[in-house]
Image (cartoon, rainbow, N blue to C red):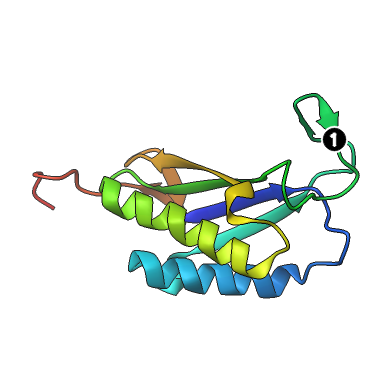
Amino acid sequence: MPFIHIHSLPFQTPLDVPQVLQALSQDFALATGTALEHVSATWQFLQPGHYAVAGRTAPSQPSDSHPLLVTVLAPDFWPPSRIEQSLRAVAVSLAAQVPSARNNVFIHHCCAHSGQVFDGGDIVRWPTPGEPS
């Protein structure tokens, strides 16, 4: 963990999704101090016409409307400064790699709570701040 999930319309020019996800993961790891092996990222394309902004749909991903929709799922022990670093890192990385402006990216941060994650075959728990580990 963390996980970065991106949704967008297809781009007019084909996007090299594996390359973008690899670079995004590296940028995110570097910016947040997270080991690369703990970063996961996905990209799903919405069907043309299946995303409306202000009641208007689009056949492909515009560069200045219909923001890229991003969710960053990270542990709840991350302080606000690290969360902000993660949001900025995703926006900067995406804007550098895809034909969409940085101000056309919408990112939502979600917290994963200790005891509410299943990974590696079991429930994952981490100490809460101030609790002995």
Q: Is residue 60 left or right of residue 65?
A: right
The relative height of residue 57 versus residue 16 in the rendered view (above or below) is above
Q: Residue at x 64, y 51 (%)?
A: 6
In the image, residue 115 sits, relative to residue 12, either above or below, namely: above
Residue 28 percent location from the top left of the image: 46, 66
Q: Is residue 77 left or right of residue 3?
A: left
Q: Quadrant of residue 35?
A: bottom left
Q: Dot 1 corresponds to which residue?
A: 50
Residue 39 position, x and y percent, is: 48, 64
Task: Count numbered badges in the picture.
Answer: 1
Name above or below for residue 121 compared with residue 110.
Answer: below
Q: Residue at x 74, y 53 (%)?
A: 63
Residue 116 x/y as whole percent? 40, 38
Q: Amino acid at mark 1?
A: His
Q: Residue 53: percent from the left, percent from the top?
A: 75, 31
Front in this rendered view, residue 65 or 5? 65
